[in-house]
Image (spheres, helix red, strand yellow):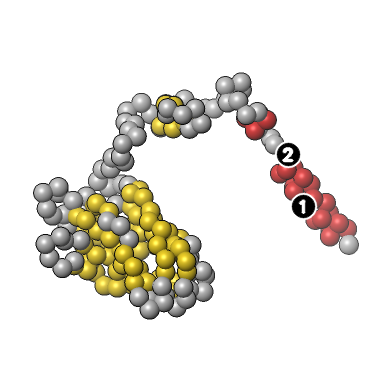
């Protein structure tokens, strides 16, 4: 009985302490009025044109561009973006094209009901010929499913592989899932 009381008291205190802001930063809307102490180096902060958005860069050697994302390089996963698509029962849909620098390619499918399954096929877009499948069709189950491909070859004048994902043939319809892409 005493142990149960102590456990209830502990969890009640824990919940109450989580509701009280513990950070001096959380107590104000003006980020310039409080100085936050840290033992890491000060990040390089650049402000965009509108006053509501700040971009924090890890160091001064990182470039900043509002025009487009620049790939980071070989050996690292570079986030290329995402494409929201519907997930149909008896047919497939295609995501938009993503430019790959070759090597590895990875996707994550978000927003799928846990009980649902679906097929995923990586395709290479070719404007002059039929599109080529890369690897075999794979089956995904539920949410946050990750798929990876390796040895992606580049082609064409731009030195990139134009890739898209064919997704569908689900056991149940989902109105919108997100396909997140890394190269």
Instruction: Name the residue tied to disc 1.
Output: 11
- Horizontal side of residue 51 vs 107, given as left or right: right
| Residue 12, placed above or below residue 52 | below
- Asked which secondary structure carries label 2, the reply is loop
Q: Choose between 41 and 65: the one closer to the eye.
A: 65
- Asked which secondary structure carries label 1, the reply is helix
Q: Choose between 149 and 94: the one closer to the eye.
A: 94
Number of marks in picture: 2
- Horizontal side of residue 103 vs 144, given as left or right: left
The label shown at residue 27 is none
Residue at point 77% right, 45% down? 16
Q: Choose between 78 and 51: the one closer to the eye.
A: 51
Instruction: Name the residue tied to disc 2.
Output: 20
| Residue 176, placed above or below residue 41 | below
Quadrant that contains the N terminus: bottom right
**Disc with the residue nearer the chain's start (1 vs 2):** 1
- Horizontal side of residue 5 vs 23, given as left or right: right
- Disc 1 packing (10 Å; few <14; some 14–19; many ≥20): few
- Horizontal side of residue 38 vs 56, given as left or right: right
Residue 12, position as x, y percentages in the image = 79, 50
Residue 178 falls in which quadrant of the image?
A: bottom left
Residue at point 44% right, 62% down? 177
State which mark lies toward you, 1 or 2.
2
Residue at point 36% right, 50% down? 81
Residue 90 falls in which quadrant of the image?
A: bottom left
Q: Is residue 75 visible?
A: yes
Residue 36 falls in which quadrant of the image?
A: top right
Q: Is residue 139 visible?
A: no
Per the model, the C-alpha gap separating discs 1 and 2 is 15 Å
Residue 42, position as x, y percentages in the image = 47, 25
């Amino acid at each position: 009985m005493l142990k149960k009381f102590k456990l209830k008291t502990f969890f009640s205190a824990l919940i109450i302490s989580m509701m009280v802001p513990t950070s001096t930063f959380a107590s104000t809307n003006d980020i310039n009025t409080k100085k936050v102490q840290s033992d890491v180096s000060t990040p390089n902060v650049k402000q965009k044109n509108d006053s509501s958005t700040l971009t924090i860069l890890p160091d001064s050697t990182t470039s900043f561009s509002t025009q487009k994302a620049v790939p980071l390089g070989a050996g690292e996963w570079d986030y290329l973006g995402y494409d929201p698509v519907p997930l149909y029962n008896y047919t497939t849909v295609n995501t938009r094209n993503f430019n790959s620098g070759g090597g590895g390619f990875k996707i994550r499918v978000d927003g799928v009901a846990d009980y649902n399954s679906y097929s995923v096929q990586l395709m290479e877009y070719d404007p002059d010929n039929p599109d080529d499948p890369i690897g075999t069709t794979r089956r995904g189950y539920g949410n946050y499913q990750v798929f990876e491909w390796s040895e992606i070859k580049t082609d064409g004048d731009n030195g990139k592989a134009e890739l898209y994902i064919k997704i569908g043939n689900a056991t149940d319809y989902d109105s919108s899932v997100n396909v997140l892409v890394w190269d």
